[in-house]
Amino acid sequence: MVRRLLGTAVFGYFALFAVLILLLGYRWNVHRKPPTQPIAYSHEIHVGKLGLKCESCHTSVDTSTFAGVPSVSRCMECHKTVLADRPEIKKLHKYWTDKKPIPWNRVYRIRIRNYVYFSHKRHIKAGIKCLQCHGEVKAMPQMRAVRSLKMGWCKSCHLAHNAPTDCLTCHR
Amino acid sequence: MDFLSQHVIPPTGHYMMLLEFLAVVVYLVHLPYVGAVVGSTALSMWLSFRDREIPDSRYSRFAGDLVDAVLRNKAAMFVLGVCPLFVLPFVYVEWFHGVDASPIRYIPLVIPGAIVGFGFIRLYYDSYVERRHRFGYHMLAGLAGIVFLKISYFILVATVARLHDPEKWFRVKDLFVMLLNWNAIWKFAFLVHASIAFTGVAALYLFFVVRRREMQRDPTYSLFVSRFSAGLALAFTFAMPVYYLLFIFTTPDVALDNVIYVLAAVVCAVAMLIAQLLIAVLRDGRPRALLAMTLFVAIFAISSTVDLRAMANANAEHFHLVANKAATAYALREASLEARMKAKREGLTARAGTITASGGALVPVGERLYKMKGCMACHSIDGTRFIGPSLKGVFGQRITVVTDGKPRQITVDEAYLRKSILDPNADIVSGFKPLMPSQAGIVDDSEISALIEYIKSLR
């Protein structure tokens, strides 16, 4: 009987850790991994191979708090004819004809909670380059957040650049 | 480690996968051995100390046999302990080619530290026979060996752990900041515990597989050895999943993926099998050494794979860029090599490096660039009008371009093509919009030459 109990205890002990690890994995899957997007847009092709600049699509990055995502018409400027037979481009055409915006899944805003104020305009005006926070976008086939966007990370950069670290700067 | 960067070639995608395999093999050969060395040194030190306090012939015999089994072979110490240390810096420099802020600059520190550590372990081994007269010296040698080896491997583990977290590299200004990292601490704790557990299993293997006859002659001693080793291994096997959970928990999101979580759960399962096996050994004394060894090697292999995968995930973009650069560099190098061989065949004398690729040899390179750099998205090669003019037959053609708002006739030549790639909106082909972005910085001069050769070939 003791033998059985011991066997079960050992099994339970290791199984507990395996389950905890798998639960962590589930959490990562749901909240932390790069989200799938309605159209498999690849920054690697458009920025890496074609050389498009960030601000040519994310136009309000230096005039507003948010950087903005291009409207469907911007995509259609090239894709009315370019590679129009591809399945992903066909999805784009469908959004165009239905006159609906593409429901992109947020990659960065979910990490900075709604109670944190962040202004792109201020950071661009301070001379921060896009790739310092967003990483090498031109090598990403799928957009992902490469910085943790934790408060400690923001604060370290603010301290290095003599930017305000007062609470009310971001927690408005 | 900039001096090393000059001696390694940037790896292509396939080469990087091969390096990953090589790194797993090197870690698999090296880390268990170092673990066994440190573990058996520590264990024999403790056993000798205990025997000195309360004489126990089993303890002193076991300590002596352990030292003899693990530490005697100098060749093994050199091949398994020292040689792999020289492979690792080269492997990491290949991966992080061109990155100057990465923590890999601390990896070479491991080499002298480990060599000194192994030196002290040799002193410990050599002074074993006379330990009763020179006890302090003997113990000090063992302690120094363990301390040097442990510090060196902490540096290695901390460096490798930092590679998973590129956003913090700018903070690593010195060695101490690099070492203060929870991920590194849990990883190192895991390594230490796995090593001590492995020492127990290695003892089982060395005594009951390699020295089987000797053990069979003395059943009492044999029972003692099997139970002691299994008990030691068991105690630390229980600690392993705790540290695994903690180090997965402290790994940044950017380095994780589903496969890593699954592999970590598999490690817990394998650890459970080892625990049950060791309990059986404790119960009846039958060593089951081969199975225990196999399972342990599996845990080390999986752990190395997990670690390297996490590093690849966190640095995916960098590896991608290096592989792309390498691919073009290789293509150009091959084209130039072919040109040189062709010149040799045709009887021309060629001094190395004076003939660069030209003409026909560049056409396949140009074709590759046409696809890779995205020209094909807007310029067809079969006459179809896309958003940009087709490239079929364009070289030598007479076309109308609009320069500063005024149309004029020109013949398409090399100069025009070169200008159009670098400053496309200067001379727009009439009937097309000024939409092409400049390719300056995306293609260099030799790549533009390759593209021009390709365009020339499109009749």
Image (cartoon, coloured by chain):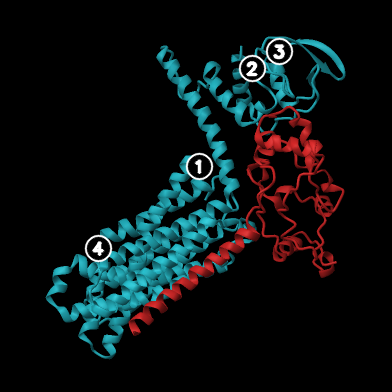
Chain colours: A red, B cyan
Mark sitting earlier along the chain (1/2): 1
Q: Nearer the viewer, mark 2 or mark 4?
A: 2
Measure the C-alpha gap from mark 4 to mark 1. Answer: 36 Å
SS for tag 3?
loop
Tell me the crowding category of disc 3: few under 14, some 14 to 19, or many 20 or more residues within 10 angstroms, Cα based. some
Mark sitting earlier along the chain (4/3): 4
In the image, taking residue B223 as reference, residue A145 lies left or right, namely: right
Residue B73, numbered label = 4
Indicate the amino acid at tag 3: Val
SS for tag 4?
loop
Which residue position is annotated with label 1?
A: B6
In the image, taking residue B120 as reference, residue B424 lies left or right, namely: right
Measure the C-alpha gap from mark 4 to mark 3. Answer: 74 Å
Tell me the crowding category of disc 4: few under 14, some 14 to 19, or many 20 or more residues within 10 angstroms, Cα based. few
Which residue position is annotated with label 3?
A: B412
Which residue position is annotated with label 2?
A: B382
The chain letter for the residue carrying disc 4 is B
Q: Residue at x 44, y 47 (%)?
A: B19
Measure the C-alpha gap from mark 2 to mark 4. Answer: 69 Å
